Amino acid sequence: MRDRYPGREAPAATQRTCLIVDDSRVIRKVSSKIAISLGYVPIEAENGEEALARCKKSMPDLVLTDWNMPEMDGITFVTKLRSIPTPREPTVVFCTSNGEAQDIHDGIAAGADDYIVKPFDEAALKAKLEKLGRG
């Protein structure tokens, strides 16, 4: 077989990335396992500030974010994330215990694509992501 890229390595297949933003280490680990099962490379952040810095460095394909976090809450993070100029906007899903109708409305109004209430299991998150075309 002929080398299609003489003198250099073939480009790596593009890997989908999922940024998981939550101040709970346990939630980040569980969400990372789910992301891996869906074919994503997980990236973790403890709060909105850290997540925003990661997004400015390299925009992920998918963001799963909590609402209640120290430093910068999820609403502020999503609002600031959506203001970053990028050729491809990530899909953003709130994964939070704030489950009132007004919370869901506020999350979507801030720029989230969807919303899932904690506690959730792998099947529920997979179904939500598949609905969004991110499964």
Image (tube, rainbow, N blue to C red):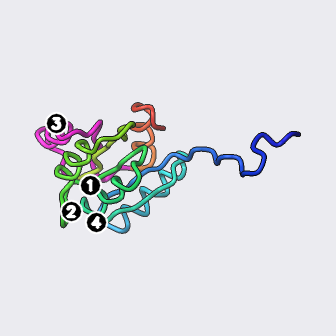
Q: Are marks 1 and 2 in contact (CB under 8 Å)?
A: yes
Residue neighbourhood size for the residue with mark 1, other residues' Cα within 10 Å, grouped as few (<14), some (14–19), many (≥20): many
Q: Position of residue 1 (x, y in %)?
A: 88, 40
Inspect the image, locate mark 1, and give the three-letter code of the amino acid beneath it: Asp
Identified by mark 4, the residue type is Asp
Identified by mark 2, the residue type is Met
Q: Is residue 130 magenta?
A: no
Up-down relation of residue 118 to residue 132 (above or below):
below
- Residue 130, by quadrant, is top left
Q: Residue placed at 19% from the left, 42% from the top?
A: 107
Q: Which residue sits at x=32%, y=58%?
A: 21
Are the residues flagged by discs 3 and 4 in contact, CB closer than 8 Å?
no
Going from the N terminus, do you reach mark 3 or mark 1 first? Answer: 1
* Rendering coords of residue 48 (x, y %): 25, 59
Please report whichever mark, 3 or 4, sits nearer to the chain's N-terminal start.
4
- Helix or strand or loop: what does disc 3 sit on? helix
Residue on which the image places disc 2: 69
Q: Nearer the viewer, residue 98 or 135?
A: 135
Between 37 and 2, the one lying in front of the other is: 2
Vertical placement of residue 28 versus 94, above or below? below
Which residue position is annotated with label 4?
23
* Mark closest to the chain's N terminus, 4 or 2: 4
Q: Nearer the viewer, mark 3 or mark 1?
A: 3
Choose the circle earlier in sequence order: 4 or 1: 4
Query: Do the residues bearing badges 4 and 1 touch, measured as CB atoms within 8 Å?
Result: yes
4 horizontally vs 49: left or right? right
For label 2, the crowd category at 10 Å Cα-Cα, with few meaning under 14, some 14 to 19 and many 20 or more, is some
Q: Quadrant of residue 101?
A: top left
Question: Marks 4 and 1, Cα distance to the nearest angstrom?
Answer: 8 Å
The residue carrying mark 3 is 109
Residue pointed to by mark 1: 66
In magenta, the rendered stretch is: 97-120
